[in-house]
Image: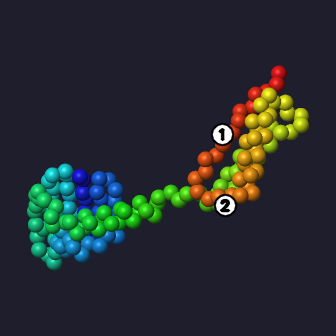
Amino acid sequence: MRLIIVREDKYVSIDGVGYHDMDMSSIPSNIHAVQWYDDEGEIEYITIKGKSREPNKRITSLDDFQTIISLWEQTDQQKKIVSAPQPPTIEDNLITAKGKLNETDYAVLPDVKIVNLDQFIEYREWLRNFLFDPKGGIIDWPIKPQPVWIN
């Protein structure tokens, strides 16, 4: 695991996924940042009220930072839920069905000569039936036929 905590920026990143505006109340005020690389890391300190800066401290445990790691995990879960794709609505599927129907209008014109006209008629009938009884969610749309032109 690669962990970066920057207290002043209220930033936490785990394995390249970072979030700002994190609650840093569990991080001591003299810490500037924490860097962790798989099984070891270091704490970088800041100067407080004119005192000289402490040297970086090597660490071999993240026990002191479990609160901020848990907060990052909660934030990450919430972001994934919010950004999860939503299934299409009835309105979305109506737009799709109308578009698919419009794409094949040419096939049923009287001056268009195709061998597989029956496939287009069946396909378009399925789409028109859907328009009369639309549903939301993922639809198993029929495959649009490819025209076979009469020579």
- Judged left or right of residue 115, residue 29 is left
Residue 143's label in the rendered image is 1
Alpha-carbon neighbours of circle 1 within 10 Å: few (<14), some, or many (≥20)? few
Residue at the far right: name it: 110
Q: Position of residue 91 (x, y in %)?
A: 66, 60
> At label 1, which amino acid type do we have?
Ile
Of the two numbered discs 1 and 2 in the rendering, the one whose residue sits closer to the viewer:
1
Q: Amino acid at mark 2?
A: Glu
Q: Is residue 40 above or below residue 30?
A: above
Q: Which mark is residue 91?
A: 2
The x and y percentages for residue 93 are 65, 55
| x, y percent for residue 100 | 71, 46
Q: Alpha carbon of mark 1 to alpha carbon of mark 2: how far?
A: 21 Å
Numbered badge on residue 94: none
Precedes in sequence: disc 1 or disc 2: 2
In the foreground, 131 or 33: 131
Q: How is the image coloured?
A: rainbow
Relative image position of residue 3 (x, y in whole percent): 24, 57
